[in-house]
Amino acid sequence: MQKADNLKEYRDELRESLDNDFLRTTLDNFAVAYRAGRANAFKDMDVRGLIDEIACSKDEATANLDALYREFKEKAEAAGVHVHLAKDAQAANDIIAAIARKSNCQKIVKSKSMTAEETLLNHALEDEGLEVTETDLGEWIIQLRHEGPSHMVMPAIHLSRYQVGDLFTEVTGKKQDSEIEKLVKVARRELRQKYVEADMGITGANFAVAETGSIGLVTNEGNARLVTTLPRVHVALMGLDKLLPTLHDALRILKALPRNATGQAITSYVTWITGANECASAPDGKKEIHFVMLDNGRSELAKDPLFSQVLRCVRCGACANVCPVYRLVGGHKMGHIYIGAIGLILTYFFHGKHAAKNLIQNCINCEACKDICAGGIDLPRLIKEIHARIQDEDGHPLPSILLGKVLKNRKLFHTLLRTAKWAQKPVAEKDGFIRHLPMVFAKEHGFRALPTIAETPFRDRWEEIRPVVDNPKYRVALFSGCVQDFVYPEQMEAAVKLFGAESVEMSYPMNQSCCGLPVQMMGEMKASREVCVQNLRAFEAGGYDYVITLCASCAAHLKHNYPKLVMDTPSLALKAQEFADKIIDYSSFVHDVLKVKAEDFVQTGGKATYHAPCHLCRGLDVHAAPRELISTGGLEYVECNEEEVCCGFGGTFSMKFPELSAELLKKKLANVEATGAEVLLTDCPGCIMQLRGGLKTRGSSVKVRHVSEVLADNRRK
Amino acid sequence: MTTGTDYCQTFVDKAKAVSAIVTEVKSDDEALKYVIDLCDRKEVCQLLVSGCERDLSDKAEKLCDLKQKKVIAAPGLKKPLYDKLAEMSAKAGFECIDSGMRDHLAGVDIGFTYAEYGLAETGTLMLDCPGEDMRLATMVSEFHVCVLPKSKIRKDSYAVEKMMLTRMGKTPDYLAFITGPSRTADIERVLALGVHGPLELHILLMED
Ligand code: SF4
Ligand code: SF4
């Protein structure tokens, strides 16, 4: 649960998690094992196709929520089930408490339900004097500890066997040791008598099938089967988003859900319940069944053109499994009740701005969650949109406003950067790093050295170095982005050199500015849009075959976000789409378009490894091109462990959460050093800034370079 | 149409991958014999190896005391087959029941059932169990033994969708997909079998 009032308190909480070695090791092991398990489970399957189908069918269901609810209710009632609609959490809890009172229930067994967590159902029922026992092992453990879940699928993943052993000793009143196999059996036998005594069973539901009025439950332990069989009353609490038109829709999700959640092809039990079943303990031999359908803002969400996709979520938990931030800080810090990327979003809609306002900033925008989501939800985008909304409602913090203001005015921005060159003089060293950090950065930023502003920005060198190309093969425009323009112009120059030699005619439109991603990351949507429009104008002259950028983040932002930023203005939307279609990253252009050959490069043969920028590997789905270029360009490519995991830069994220950025970088660099490579190559100046700074601070001899620099150096004249 | 034995090998591989014990049998009689042999071999309470000697809270202990004799539960069986099993059980000194599962909630040794379909893609058994004795027999048994005729193996869940809809149409209905024994990984992500349901799932693939 989120209790932090402000970002500072939240950061203090995060630091606590970083110091929890057990949690860190567990989540590290899990992240690695999960990746392999999932890949194996989806082997030989068209995952993308399946996810697209799920997204489509969920969108259709969302668009017809009312009709689906009516059909479901009618079918379920015809089969003897009572169906209730609860407008919010309180209403749902009241309905369930009333059922318990009316049917004279005292003892309740429960199987796992995130929806019941959402409404804080247990507390409400306990306040009514009812005894509630969670029967899912993980849920039982956290219930006994009075905690919330730290993962949507593995609620007790933050606890060790020793902690569970101690807990069970307390619960049974007899000494229990910490062997997992034995602890599980203790739970089995302790809980069995709870089922026997219970008069009400509460479950969630994974699917509500309208065509039959059935619910589907997906579990591993089998507790849901006992919960729905033994007590005489069964209540299933589920969100309206669980409604699906047909059984086929449910079976389709079932193909993805367990695979995406835990790498299982299917869970041990999937239970389909239709109508009031036989129940020997009920007065008439028939179970009393209630389906409580929770709205709690869902029908509003369903109408929102952007956010309706949130309802595609099938609660597989995968967006936490792959999130580098979750991996560092765990679920209690990466959510309120719902956890992971979707947790950041749902917290805002279900639990309000106050619980969400700090959390929502804790996303590095690496897109790992988007890449894996079973519902194909554009999670990072929604996270940024909510961040922006909260700022619009609550007021923007000063640094964020300032950055927005500055970026909107290109001339001012560039003047500031040029001035910075002079301002940094007293602290700049000859090796291109700043010696002492200016006072504005506290000591927590010391984990990486920061680069100095270059003597002459790329834009000032352009006219001088611009090659004359006769009979060009391609006509392209260069988009430098601010970092390569003002900090690392040599990377641009390296590209210009190679392109010139490959008969590519280049333009560098002078009115281009920052791509706008940094302000978008800070929730300054207006400024982001204005910068976008300025850049579209700068490249208006057109007639280019491609617009090339050496910055993966710029590339992904220009390609994917520009059309979205101006989609409300038809004249611009078209322009933005044309522009976006022409955007290509350096490695793809050289590898796929120019198709450079090994014989054109001196084979120097040093060992080089690679860091895949988030916005290249996931943002643009580019994987092979840069790695193959390393070999083509004359070096020996050695694979690095977790090559596609974020380096921790994340632009403004590393300024806001330096401790997290430092930890991500530490991991990355340890993996890099383990390869034994002398050079680390990558495709993004932001990553280069982070990686170089970190290696410098570690005193490492590994050199970090842009792929373009190696290719330019090794090209035969 | 590709059905039945074409998917047999996939089914076996997938079921074994989730810790099911798969054996081929030629006939119902052979299946019954398997059940009796298995019951004979197993400890009175299989939980013993992994927990019965552990102290529990007093209430939970009491429930355990209820169980005295080895019990085989086979609620869904056809009459002649059940009679045969009952006779064999009596000879072997086991109690055999086809109803009244609520008197055995501390657990039975073996739950014996026939599956309606098998899903090759995931090694899953499909069992329709509208009656609660059938549900309980497959949940409170320490070992669940389930016969699956080879001709009933289908490719995946889509291939049994129609059959599912037919059953769901005859309300009320309670339909189960069962894949491997009950499992959890809730403590330190370490896999443990038999958390609430069976410790072992035996699938008897029957020629037909
Ligand atoms: S974009 Fe990356 S950091 Fe942000 S929520 Fe998704 S996985 Fe986590
Ligand atoms: S948002 Fe996507 S990945 Fe996350 S839990 Fe929902 S379906 Fe799974």
Image (tube, coloured by chain):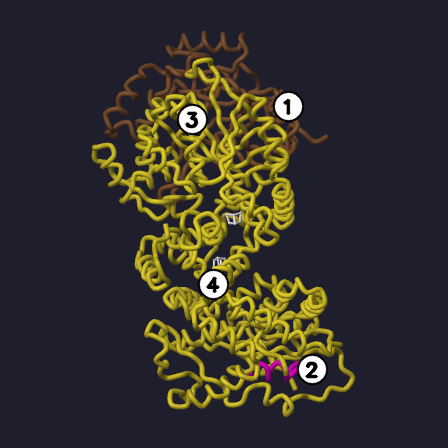
Element assignment for label 4 = helix
- Asked where in the image residue A283 lies, by quadrant, the reply is top left
Q: Position of residue A242 (x, y in %)?
A: 55, 38
**Residue A606 within the magenta-colored segment of the rendering:** no
Q: Mark 2 points at which residue?
A: A506
Total residue callouts: 4
Cα–Cα gap, marks 3 and 4: 42 Å
Q: Give the range drawn in magenta.
A: A489-510
Disc 1 under 8 Å from ligand 2? The reply is no
Q: Residue at x 45, y 76 (%)?
A: A692
- Asked where in the image residue B28 lies, by quadrant, the reply is top right
For mark 4, does the 10 Å Cα neighbourhood hold few (<14), some (14 to 19), or many (20 or more) residues? some
Precedes in sequence: disc 4 or disc 2: 4
Q: Position of residue B98 (x, y in %)?
A: 46, 12
Cα–Cα gap, marks 3 and 1: 31 Å
Precedes in sequence: disc 2 or disc 3: 3
In this image, A610 relative to A474: left or right? left
Spot the yellow chain and give its letter. A
Q: Mark 1 points at which residue?
A: B166
Q: Name the mark on residue A391.
A: 4
**From the image, which quarter does the C terminus of chain A lie in?**
bottom right
Element assignment for label 1 = helix
Q: Do the residues labelled 3 and 1 touch (CB within 8 Å)?
A: no
**Residue A498 within the magenta-colored segment of the rendering:** yes
Foreground label between 2 and 3: 3
For mark 1, does the 10 Å Cα neighbourhood hold few (<14), some (14 to 19), or many (20 or more) residues? few
Q: Is residue A588 above or below residue A113?
A: below
Cα–Cα gap, marks 4 and 1: 53 Å
